[in-house]
Image: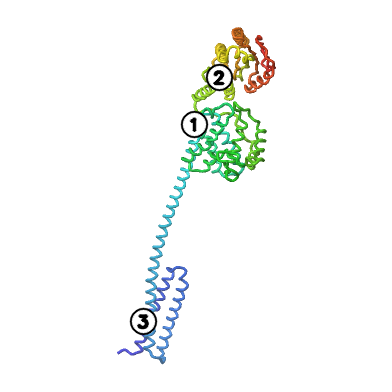
């Protein structure tokens, strides 16, 4: 039989071993625990160390036969040590599970990070692709717009040049006003097609070399509506559609097609309105002379002060006009053969119905297109008038008198063809035109003797008509220096002959001077 003292020593020793094992295991687990749990874990280890010291103290007391119930104390110590060991075992299992979970979490975090990096790369690649697609789409859109205005150029070269001029001016104004890059790009694209609706305007209106009447104006006023309808079907950006639709609207409601006022008109159409008006003012047309840049700017300020144009836009334009490269040169027509088409269209338009005579404005059109060789040669304008035609109509009848003048014109046409030298883009160096009842002859002289011979042949034909039909005539001949604008020469000729007393049947006066002296009635 074992004595109670021996049993107590065994129980205490076993409990102490349990506690010591728990302390050692706890110290090993400490480094594996998360930082937040390590301090609390040390407190638990400290408590176990305290229990272990208690075991040693009880053993010492028991060894010296200290009076207390040995078995009870020993059993308590044993079970406390056993409990400490179970606690440590349970915590160890929990820590293992926690570490496995943390390891799985770490692996999951790494996987997520890899996927996130891959996703970032895919997003970056997609963004780059979208940017490239957007850039390609913008280039395609610009090319498409260029193609559209070249189609317009095949209808009217002036409108083609005008679109590029307005785009350049508007872009400069937009930069001065601090518009962002995307708006500047839209502004330029919109300007290139702002008159695209003119492709549907009949040639009799679009190419008319004279002032519009009410019906012409009504037809022309449709071009913003036509252009906006065409573009809006295929282009999703409303800003381009607004430029096309609103560039003729005015702040005071006097514009078209809707008579919009104030804030109902967008900032981009307001800019285009100023650029469009300015280019129209400085451009020369067969039915109008051009204004100087200074005068055009003054007119823009007048419109701004009157509340018609945007004052801020005009102010910005006035700041860039000095540095603006205007727009003197005309861009070439899309293809070489289109020049022939353009000239044929002009000739057809200017030719009088049922006759071979061209209206004198055809000459202005040729000069406006810089096709004449007048810059290389001096040239004559010869004006033939019939002051007694009303009396002739009463004497021989209206129909017969008209026929006489027409036949005389055909005789003059044959003479001009005889003296004319071939030209590449127009009928020849000597051309006959008609202005009402009057005949006008344009002659570029490459040989000095041609002028006197031409005037002699013309006078002979006129004298024959006078002798045969009593058709009185007045002939004015004037020579102009090379480079003199035809519109200036015609205006000078008509102004100086308007109030002169007509004289009849005189022999033509030959003037070899290239300087534009006074016009002499013959």
312 lies above or below 327 = below
Q: Which residue is mark 1?
A: 151
Q: Secondary structure at mark 3?
A: helix
Judged left or right of residue 18, residue 365 is right
Please state the total of marks drawn on the protein image: 3
Above or below for 31 versus 162:
below
Residue 191 in the image: above or below residue 27:
above
Between residues 169 and 434, which one lies in front from this camera angle?
434
Q: Which residue is mark 2?
A: 358
Image quadrant assignment for residue 462: top right
Mark pair 1, 3: CA separation: 106 Å
Whole-angstrom CA distance, mark 1 to mark 2, is 27 Å
Question: Which image quarter is the C terminus in?
Answer: top right
Tell me the quadrant of the picture where the N terminus can be found: bottom left
Depth check: give the residue in front, 177 or 275: 275
Q: Neighbour class for label 1 at 10 Å: few (<14), some, many (≥20)? A: some
* Rendered location of residue 85, percent (x, y): 38, 77
Q: Nearer the viewer, mark 1 or mark 2?
A: 2
Q: Position of residue 326 (x, y in %)?
A: 61, 32
- Which label sits in the foreground, 3 or 2? 2
* Disc 3: which residue: 14
Q: Secondary structure at mark 1?
A: helix
Q: Residue shown at 38%/90% (left/top)?
A: 69
């Amino acid at each position: 039989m074992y004595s109670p003292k021996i049993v107590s020593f065994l129980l205490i020793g076993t409990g102490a071993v349990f506690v010591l094992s728990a302390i050692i295991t706890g110290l090993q687990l400490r480094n594996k625990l998360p930082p937040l749990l390590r301090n609390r874990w040390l407190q638990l280890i400290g408590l176990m160390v305290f229990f272990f010291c208690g075991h040693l103290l009880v053993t010492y007391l028991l060894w010296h036969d200290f009076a207390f119930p040995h078995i009870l104390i020993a059993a308590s110590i044993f079970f406390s040590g056993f409990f400490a060991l179970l606690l440590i075992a349970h915590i160890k299992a929990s820590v293992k599970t926690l570490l496995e979970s943390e390891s799985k979490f770490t692996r999951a975090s790494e996987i997520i990070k890899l996927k996130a990096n891959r996703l970032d790369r895919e997003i970056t690649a997609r963004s780059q692709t979208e940017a490239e697609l957007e850039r390609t789409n913008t280039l395609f859109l610009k090319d498409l717009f260029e193609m559209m205005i070249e189609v317009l150029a095949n209808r009217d070269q002036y409108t083609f040049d005008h679109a590029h001029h307005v785009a350049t001016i508007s872009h400069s104004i937009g930069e001065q006003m601090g518009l962002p890059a995307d708006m500047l790009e839209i502004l330029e694209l919109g300007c290139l097609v702002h008159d695209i609706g003119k492709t549907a305007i009949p040639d009799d209106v679009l190419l008319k070399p004279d002032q519009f009447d009410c019906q012409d104006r009504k037809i022309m006023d449709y071009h913003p509506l036509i252009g906006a309808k065409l573009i809006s079907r295929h282009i999703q950006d409303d800003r381009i559609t607004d430029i096309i639709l609103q560039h003729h609207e005015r702040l005071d409601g006097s514009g078209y097609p809707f008579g919009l006022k104030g804030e109902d008109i967008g900032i981009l159409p307001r800019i285009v309105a100023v650029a469009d008006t300015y280019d129209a003012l400085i451009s020369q047309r067969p039915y109008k002379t051009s204004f100087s840049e200074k005068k055009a700017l003054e007119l823009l300020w007048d419109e701004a002060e009157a509340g018609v144009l945007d004052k801020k836009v005009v102010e910005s334009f006035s700041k860039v006009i000095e540095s603006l490269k205007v727009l003197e040169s005309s861009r070439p027509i899309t293809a070489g053969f289109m020049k022939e088409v353009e000239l044929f269209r002009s000739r057809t338009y200017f030719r009088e119905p049922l006759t071979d005579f061209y209206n004198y404005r055809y000459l202005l059109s040729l000069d406006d297109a810089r096709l004449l060789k007048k810059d290389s040669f001096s040239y004559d304008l010869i004006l033939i008038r019939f002051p007694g035609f009303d009396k002739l109509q009463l004497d021989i009848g209206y129909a017969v008198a008209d026929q006489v003048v027409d036949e005389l014109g055909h005789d003059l046409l044959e003479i001009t063809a005889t003296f004319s030298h071939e030209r590449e883009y127009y009928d020849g160096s000597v051309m006959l035109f008609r202005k009402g009842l009057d005949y006008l002859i344009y002659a570029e002289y490459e040989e000095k003797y041609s002028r006197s011979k031409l005037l002699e042949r013309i006078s002979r034909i006129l004298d024959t008509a006078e002798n045969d039909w009593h058709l009185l005539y007045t002939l004015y001949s004037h020579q102009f220096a090379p480079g003199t604008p035809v519109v200036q020469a015609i205006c000078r000729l008509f102004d100086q002959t308007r109030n002169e007393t007509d004289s009849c049947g005189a022999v033509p006066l030959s003037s070899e001077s290239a300087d534009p002296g006074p016009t002499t009635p013959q």
